[in-house]
Amino acid sequence: MKRTAKWSEFVNKFMWSYVYVYLVQTYGNPNVTYDWYAGNSGVTNRSGKFIAAHAAHAGLMMFWAGSFTLFELARYDPSVPMGTQNLICLPHLASLGIGGIEGGVITDLYACTVIAVLHLIFSGVLGAGGLLHSLKFEGDLAEATGRPKKFDFTWDDPDRLTFILGHHLIFLGLGAIQFVEWAKYHGIWDSAQGVVRTVEPNLSAAQVWNHQVDFLSISSLEDVMGGHGILAFILISGGAFHIVTKQFGEYTEFKGKGLLSAESVLSYSLAGVGYMAFVAAFWCSSNTTVYPTEFYGEVLKINFEFFPYFTDTASGLPTDMHTARAWLTNAHFFLGFFYIQGHLWHALRGMGFDFRRVSNAFDNMEDAKITVK
């Protein structure tokens, strides 16, 4: 009982520390203090610790992918349709043509096991990198020497932030190229033909433009890969632009002066992730080219009550069973919703809105009721 009480006390401290930091302490207080469990406070104005957190976070994602793939392999049943087994990692591997796919069934579990173990190994490398940056290297890159110092930043420095953004964009572009090359030389699953085949990307800018309004119903793998190829070009070009250029002229209000802060940058990131989550949700719910029915189950229908949600259309499913497409779509949709709420929260804070005005307004309403009585 004592151990349970201590754990409950720790959780309460952990949660309320965020409330205290966000709602009370940071408003008009130049000497903010944080306890060790206050989370993001550990990287506040410490660019070296910020990199450590990034590396450790990437390691956690790698660990989840590897461990969950092994978990799914342990319960995978080739005699049952994959879309009804509540899987997510294995369907993605199958869509990439990994696992000796025959008739929509994974036949080579060893290949999937190798992928899972590699993710676990890389998670250890990234985790070690996070610890190295956290314990060995400078917590503030302003104190570093050589090239690492170029990645030191302050939230209100547009030149340094655009330099770092450029590197992010280039790595995203390289990831898109890797996907295109994988499809071109190894092959991915084609649900129309029922085989793993190589795909030559359709690098036509016209087809990308034409799919601006109907991309949810895209049915050509060539167009999908072509879109990724053109996206890679845009990302790498944008990355190079941000690395070699600086702000032209004075950094004015028109260019965002006053809106460039930790809160604002976080709000932009949350908006982007929320938007992508919504796109992924609607795409997963209706598209069978990128999300084949063999791996994810039948397409869904959208329902509206208090809020929209997606339900299965396949018949014969047990009452307590949903397809992988159903829970994957709904998870993306609701996570996207909360990401957008976080975006609005941090965007308003970045614009200077004082959320104490909300609590004060409720207090004033309560005082008015007491006065009337």
Image (spheres, helix red, strand yellow):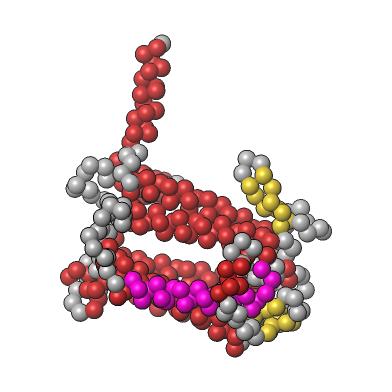
Residue shown at 21% from the left, 44% from the top: 29
Location of residue 42 (image quadrant): bottom left
Image quadrant in which the C terminus is located: top left
- Residue ranking furthest to the bottom: 185
Q: Is residue 49 left or right of residue 221?
A: left
Residue 312's x, y, as percent?
Answer: 73, 56
Residue 87 highlighted magenta (yes or no):
no
Report the residue at 65% width, 76% height from top.
221
Q: Is residue 182 above or below residue 323?
A: below
- The percent coordinates of residue 182 (x first, y second) are 57, 84
Q: Is residue 237 magenta?
A: yes
Which residue, as the protein is rendered here, is positioned at the far right? 316
Q: Is residue 94 visible?
A: no
Q: In the depicted view, which residue is nearer to us: 47 or 215?
A: 215
For the record, the magenta segment spans: 218-242
Which sits in the foreground, 287 or 66? Answer: 287
Image coordinates of residue 147 in percent, x first then y, are 24, 79
